[in-house]
């Protein structure tokens, strides 16, 4: 999704800005650009990759000490150079066109009242050169400018409805950048010498530049000048935001022996799970203790004792980890659990229960729909909130009372893999903690579950060794247009996740069904051209699942079965079986999802798609 980098310095900051964009590339984008102050406003924009923008700025000798840069993921207006940021006021502000611009601006988010503002600005004589909502803000700031950029931005944002993080500079104030955020993240980086300062939509953009980060809060406005900065809150009062030392993640960007980040991240899962368990579990006997440091935060045990139900809110892959957790929370902890797609929950009328624990799940912790759903639940009086999240400094962690932090490390591939399995690990621990708080877990059950969890990294490594067998399946899938995924019970969400992975990076149309639903409609799709992936662990539903598989075979469908060692399903004509190394009881979803990740990955490689940056998608979805 869109990314922002900005800087005020007393050296040429173009390389710093473009490198910052390179660090944000993993989030997905379709155009990019950089603008600097150099006598007037100058910019370079491109619909190619950031590496080509780097080439372009060098050819065009673009240099300056104050500047802003952006990667754009198109919402309003097609991915085209004229829609790429930075936007200048007067739109056609390039010197070549004879109308020098005064304001340069980059924006993440969506301005909902852009039409109305556009009409008003057009009436004032502003010419628009793009279809974006962003250009409206540039003109608006220009129209309010009376010699002080900070004041102009402050007046402009008071007129905006929607979500934004912006960085702006002005032709008439060469050493100043003003930023503002509402609904989209923005951080301030404090330079080593204290003389230069930066803005970015994500601290990762500043890795290697500074580790001194200020997380701006909702409604904050920030003024960056050479050697000083200040922040005001939404009331216009001076705000002291703490400077935090944030470890840079630049090492995560190294591929090592892997061909793609997704492959690397799939293979990092044993370590990611081990780190997550270390972080959450710290010391097993203390895990559930009423007093002391609860891994989910202070007072967690007390909250867990009180709550009557759980409401999980999430999107995409994180939603599927929530769907899996429902089976655990109801089956083990006996706590009624509802799982909702965040973008649906936030807009529907629901019946709030103040004794519900609201659980958000998010890799990034910045997903706009999940954040909005959380705030909606809070506005309905639900104050017991917990997040399972991979980014400690994210808005979601800051805005919930309790948190289980997953330690997947930075996930760069757009297709989520290690974030999913670490979320499952966090959610399983939440289940055990709730079960314990409510007295629904005997000591021996607790010990058995914890033992199984500790063995997970080794079990995952054994599953990863199945990669050569999965590659042979991927060769079959590469030429297909459609695929079905079936699962039952705990493994139905795993089938959903497998289908999402396949469609996301291979562009093969894939659907997942609870296997019992097959004969209620989807069976009509089954032909010899329809591969049917079946997740078939040896659990209580296996015999039922075998009947569903017969229904597929009887219609000529070809089955690809992930069976446990003792599932008694043999490979034969039209049935391809891969055996999982061991049956893993309630934690089996963490293992069964891995071959599905590998299947999607190797099918995408065989089809030659852009695995880590699939078309139309972004890593962190910070707009609605
Ligand atoms: O950062 P989040 O976990 O909140 O993101 C939610 C979804 O956007 C994300 O899981 C998406 O579905 C992935 N690209 C799936 O691989």
Image: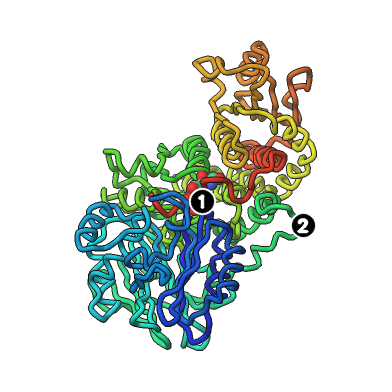
Query: Could you tell whether 200 is left or right of 91 in the image?
Result: right
First reached walking from the N terminus: tag 2 or tag 1:
2
Residues packed near mark 2 inside 10 Å, few (<14), some (14 to 19) or many (20 plus):
few
The image shows a total of numbered marks equal to 2
Which residue is denoted by mark 1 in the rendering?
618
Query: Could you tell whether 376 is left or right of 448 in the image?
Result: left
Q: Residue at x 59, y 50 (%)?
A: 613
Q: Nearer the viewer, residue 288 or 555?
A: 555
Q: Residue at x 64, y 47 (%)?
A: 611
* Above or below 559: residue 411: below
Disc 2 residue lies near ligand 1 with CB under 8 A: no
As measured in the structure, the alpha-carbon distance from the residue carrying label 2 to the one carrying label 1 is 25 Å
- Residue 96 in which image quadrant: bottom left
- Residue 231 in which image quadrant: bottom left
- Residue 493 in which image quadrant: top right
Query: Could you tell whether 193 is left or right of 355 in the image?
Result: right
Residues packed near mark 1 inside 10 Å, few (<14), some (14 to 19) or many (20 plus):
many
Residue 6 position within the rendered picture, expressed as x and y whole percent measured from the top left: 46, 73
Q: Nearer the viewer, mark 2 or mark 1?
A: 1
Residue 249 position within the rendered picture, expressed as x and y whole percent measured from the top left: 60, 67
Residue 337: tell me if it is visible. Answer: yes
* Above or below 97: residue 542: above
Mark seen at residue 87? none
* Above or below 293: residue 206: below
Query: Regarding mark 2 in the picture, which secondary structure is present there?
Result: loop
Residue 156 position within the rendered picture, expressed as x and y whole percent measured from the top left: 25, 67
Residue found at the far top of this picture: 554
Q: Residue at x 55, y 29 (%)?
A: 512
Mark seen at residue 257? 2
Query: Regarding mark 1 in the picture, which secondary structure is present there?
Result: loop
Residue 431: tell me if it is visible. Answer: no
């Amino acid at each position: 999704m869109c990314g922002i980098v900005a800087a005020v310095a007393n050296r040429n900051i173009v390389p710093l800005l473009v490198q910052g964009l390179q660090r944000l590339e993993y989030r997905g984008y379709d155009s990019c650009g950089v603008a600097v102050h150099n006598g007037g406003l100058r910019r370079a924009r491109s619909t190619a990759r950031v590496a080509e923008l780097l080439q372009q700025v060098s050819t065009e000798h673009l240099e300056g000490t104050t500047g802003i840069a952006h990667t754009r993921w198109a919402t309003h207006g097609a991915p085209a150079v004229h829609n790429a940021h930075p936007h200048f006021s007067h739109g056609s502000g390039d010197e070549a066109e004879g109308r020098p611009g005064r304001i340069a601006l980059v924006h993440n988010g969506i301005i909902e009242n852009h039409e109305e503002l556009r009409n008003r600005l057009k009436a004032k004589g502003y010419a628009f050169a793009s279809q974006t909502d962003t250009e409206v803000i540039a003109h608006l700031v220009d129209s309010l400018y009376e010699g002080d950029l900070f004041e102009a931005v402050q007046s402009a944002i008071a007129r905006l409805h929607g979500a934004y993080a912006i960085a702006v500079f002005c032709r008439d104030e060469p050493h100043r950048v003003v930023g503002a955020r509402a609904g989209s993240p923005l951080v301030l980086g404090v330079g080593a010498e204290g003389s230069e300062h930066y803005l970015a939509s994500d601290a990762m953009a500043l890795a290697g530049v500074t580790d001194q980060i200020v997380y701006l809060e909702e409604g904050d406005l920030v003024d960056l000048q050479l050697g000083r900065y200040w922040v005001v809150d939404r009331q216009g009062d001076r705000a002291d935001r703490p400077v935090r030392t944030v470890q840079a993640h630049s090492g995560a960007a190294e591929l090592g022996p892997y061909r793609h980040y997704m492959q690397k991240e799939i293979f990092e899962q044993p370590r990611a799970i081990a780190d997550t368990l270390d972080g959450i579990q710290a010391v097993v006997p203390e895990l559930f203790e009423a007093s002391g440091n609860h891994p989910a935060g202070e007072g967690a045990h007390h909250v867990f004792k009180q709550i009557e139900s759980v409401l999980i809110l999430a999107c995409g892959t994180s939603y599927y980890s929530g769907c899996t957790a429902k089976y655990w929370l109801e089956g083990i902890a006996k706590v009624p659990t509802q799982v909702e797609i965040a973008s649906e929950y936030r807009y529907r009328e629901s019946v709030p229960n103040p004794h519900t624990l609201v659980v958000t799940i998010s890799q990034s912790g910045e997903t706009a729909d999940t954040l909005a759903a959380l705030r909606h639940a809070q506005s309905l009086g639900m104050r017991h909130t917990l997040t399972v999240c991979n980014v400690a400094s994210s808005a979601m962690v800051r805005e919930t009372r309790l948190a289980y932090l997953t330690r997947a490390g930075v996930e760069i591939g757009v297709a989520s893999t290690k974030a999913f399995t670490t979320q499952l690990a966090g959610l399983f621990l939440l289940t055990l903690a709730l079960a314990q708080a409510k007295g629904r877990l005997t000591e021996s059950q607790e010990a058995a579950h914890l033992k199984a969890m500790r063995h997970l990294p080794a079990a995952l490594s054994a599953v990863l060794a199945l990669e050569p067998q999965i590659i042979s399946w991927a060769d079959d899938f590469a030429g297909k247009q459609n695929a079905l995924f079936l699962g039952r019970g705990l493994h139905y969400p795993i089938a959903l996740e497998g289908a999402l992975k396949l469609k996301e990076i291979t562009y093969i149309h894939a659907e997942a069904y609870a296997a019992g639903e097959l004969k209620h409609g989807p069976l009509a799709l089954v032909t010899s051209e329809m591969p049917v992936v079946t997740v078939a662990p040896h659990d209580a539903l296996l015999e039922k699942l075998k009947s569903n598989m017969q229904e597929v075979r009887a219609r000529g469908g070809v089955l690809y079965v992930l069976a446990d060692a003792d599932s008694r399903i043999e490979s034969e004509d039209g049935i391809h079986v891969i055996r999982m190394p061991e049956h893993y009881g309630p934690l089996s979803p963490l293992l069964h999802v891995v071959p599905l990740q590998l299947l999607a990955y190797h099918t995408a490689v065989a089809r030659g798609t852009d695995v880590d940056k699939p078309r139309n998608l972004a890593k962190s979805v910070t707009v609605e």
